[in-house]
Amino acid sequence: MENLLYITLFAPLVGSIFAGLFGAKEKNIWAGIVPSALLLASMVAALIQLGAVMDGQVISVMMFEWIASGNFSVDFGFAADQISVVMMCVVTIVSAMVHIYSIGYMSHDEGFNRFFSYLSLFVFSMLVLVMSDNFLGLFIGWEGVGLCSWLLIGFWYKKPFATWAANEAFIMNRIADLGMLVGLFIIFWQTGSLKYSEVFAVVKSIDPTVLSVAAVFLFIGAMGKSAQFPFHTWLADAMEGPTPVSALIHAATMVTAGVYLMVRSHELFALTPEVSFFVACLGTFVAAFAATMGLVNRDLKRIIAYSTLSQLGYMFVAAGLGAYWVALFHLATHAFFKALLFLGAGNVMHAMHDELDIKKMGGLFKPMRGTAIMMILASVALAGIYPFAGFFSKDKILEVAFGTHHYILWALLLMTAVLTAFYSFRLIMLVFFGKENYKEHFPALHPHEAYWYMLAAMAPLAVLAVLAGFFEHSLATLLEKAMPIFHPHISTETVMALIALTTVAVVCSIAFTVYKYNKGGFSKELESTFLYKLFYNQYYIPEFYNRCMVIPYTKLSEFAWKKVDLKIIDFVVDTIALVIYKSGERSRHIQSGNLSSMLRWMVAGVLILIIFAALYSPIK
């Protein structure tokens, strides 16, 4: 079993190195095939380990002693336990399908080889994060996915906004990561260790105030990675990267890391109820906040990105209310239908020559039947309709909120579910049905379906988007060995009533959306209303950041450069250099080579030494 753990972890790294050997050379199809095959091997190994862990095993390896300084030591160790093995399966399944899909999606890109090297390295970094048996290893993987996200979001570096978006994501995450690092320092200060088993064994003995501070700082790190308010703006801007990257970031890597951190640290957060309640409240706010922006956006990928942001809010609500296994459950189901949505969006973009405005599409169902059907399945799962995966996990979160008597949170989450159904099917209707607007905007365009193997890579995700919810009880049975399984104390009749209410509300939202857009949609007058502008402009938060932070910082930097750096620092340094140069230039005449001149200088030097000796001699 240890060998299987090594295969799961290091197969993506080998794939990354292999693709990297081709570097910036001409496209080599093997740079895509070999990393994809290695990801499939990693996936199979992870699934075998899942079976072993379900039978009661915990697979762990200690590769070597990593850091040893005084009383502090950290081993380079990894473990496949009840929590990490679930993430291993989710990461490898989604990543393998994304890799296979990318062979077709990136087939005409000049950076084909480089793309697969970065993509596999991204997966390796995420696996280091989830498989490490200590916080320091988690942090190394944490920073690794941050670096890879910068490389991949800015992959098309010749596009100015792509590099800007990559820098935005990188800088925002570095700010949040500082908070996480402080949290880790506090944990080590209090426990003397960073290994999960040792930290959680003594966590109850830590002063509650100090523990709360540590939890706050850890959550700040999670806020950055999972793009929670106010670090949320980078997630939508990250759509500038290739679409397979978006699928990987939103479904299996990067943004799920924050949720995983909370689930992994559940023993710590369970002892800090005030912090956990704040997490739940912020998650609820973000869920509704992101959904309202998805209602009006016209960018195909950004709508799906806002959906991710909203669903991450749901996950944090579950974790904040103590239902950690439900948070992990929704993370897993969401990964499958969200990856499917993004890959479907990639097919639409190829068919539309990279056009993203959904109001310039329409009527694509006929030429893109396979993509349309799978995106509809994913949208139904996202909306939470039985028997699709989203129904089981999202309704469970609503049940948790209601069962813990947080009725305001429950009501806001229910409203968000209704909004989610609306914007999901607004996208479907405007892209695949109704008037063929692309004929008006792009007369020479002839939309076509993606390559067969790209659809084949999407098919397993479509199956899991439908069936993954039925693994609810198996997952709960597995995770109860690692964490308390949360069961809200409400009657079966109440649960059935909540499910019925949610289902009716969501179905009515879908029916209204389909009916409205079949009739041509809303009038253009709506776009001039205050709320529409507020939602479309993301509540003017990016504008606020730009005016209050970016522009002042730029001006301060320009002032420091022109007034401080050039006129003070450079002036002082240049003056010192000039004085030394001039003095050297003037004194070089001493070394003229003329014997008479040099003798005169020697006599002058001897006289000066005699005068100094006479003046400062200790003999009176």
Image: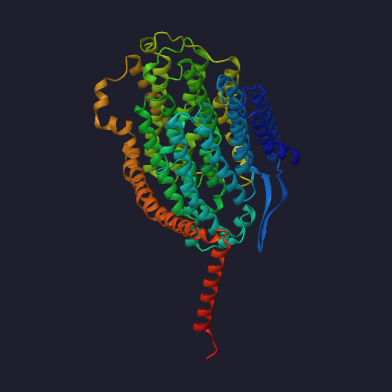
In the displayed image of the protein, which residue is found farthest to the front? Answer: 596
Q: Is residue 16 above or below residue 268?
A: above
Whole-percent x, y for residue 281 in the image = 40, 46
In the rendered structure, the answer to whether residue 451 lies left or right of residue 291 reads right
- Which quadrant holds residue 129? top right
Q: Which one is in front, 61 or 311?
A: 61
**Up-down relation of residue 270 to residue 411 (above or below):** below
Q: Provide residue 10's location: percent of width, then percent of height.
A: 69, 38
Work out whether residue 453 or residue 459 is closer to the camera in this orientation and state it: 453
Residue 30 placement, left or right of 367 = right
Q: What is the total number of numbered labels drawn onto the structure image? A: 0
- Residue 62 visible somewhere in the drawing: yes
**Identity of the residue drawn at 60% across and 60% down:** 202
Image quarter of the N terminus: top right
Query: How far across and down, in percent of the image, does residue 375 sit?
Result: 49, 21
Q: How is the image coloured?
A: rainbow
Pick the residue in front: 297 or 315: 297
What percent of the width, then of the height, locates residue 241? 49, 30
Residue beneath the point at 24% across and 27% down = 528
Q: Is residue 563 above or below residue 440?
A: below
